Image (cartoon, helix red, strand yellow):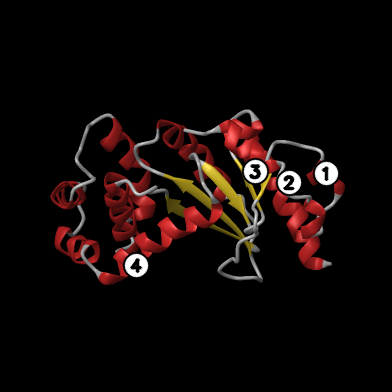
Amino acid sequence: MERRDVLKQLAALAGLSAVGVPAFAQATEQYAPVNPPQPTSDPAKIEVIEFFHYGCPHCRDFDPLVQDWVKTLPEDVTFTHVPAIWGNPKLSALAQFYYAMETVGIAHELHPKVFKAYQDGRVPLDTEEGAIQWVSDNGFDGKKFADAYKSFGVRGKVQRADQLARNYRIRGVPTLAIDGKFMTSASMSGSHESSLKVADQLISLIRQTKKG
């Protein structure tokens, strides 16, 4: 679910010398600069965001790879999932579902299962009733999940996710955003595997600039 032409236009927007990275960054179309660069949660860390949504088959294919990749990240790198919404009520409900799982501490265990349940099983996880029932069916406390699902905090996270995707001008998923400065994806790099390799290179480059 990528829009290649839009992302290639983003790649041409700004000279990367503005963020102080080596010449490597100017010699490839495997990623795009974020214009303008976005603030990160912790300036002392290198922040990686994966923009995704549960209805995306490409996100489903990417998920096992990115889960393994995250396990290899050094301590100075943080990783966060951010659901894409684009003003779509179903995607907003799926984002609410994700953040409710995260709030009660079950996202790590259930996240990989959600893609299959939603895409193959047609489980209505984009409804409150369907989400609560599915969580209960998977052996977790449905009431605790329901309370989180309806909470002000979760709704605030959904709004924040929507704004973050707008700030990054996300046009397709899965997309990786690296420290508020760059984006890469399979449509840009050629494959899911390549996008992770590009992310590794960008993390290394950003680490050098932070040290400098």
Spatial separation of the CA atoms under disc 4 and disc 3? 29 Å
Task: Say what amino acid the circle numbered 4 marks.
Answer: Gly
State if disc 3 and disc 1 touch (CB < 8 Å). Answer: no
Q: Which residue is mark 2?
A: 201
Give coordinates of residue 24: x percent, y percent. 83, 44
Give coordinates of residue 60: x percent, y percent. 42, 35
Spatial separation of the CA atoms under disc 2 and disc 3? 19 Å
Spatial separation of the CA atoms under disc 1 and disc 4? 38 Å
Task: Say what amino acid the circle numbered 1 marks.
Answer: Phe
State if disc 2 and disc 1 touch (CB < 8 Å). Answer: yes
What element does badge 1 sit on?
A: helix
Mark 1 residue crowding within 10 angstroms, few (<14) / some (14–19) / many (20+): few
Q: Is residue 129 left or right of residue 175?
A: left
Q: Which residue is mark 4?
A: 156
Residue 24 is tagged as 1
Task: Pick the residue in front: 165 or 100.
Answer: 165
Q: Is residue 155 left or right of residue 143?
A: right
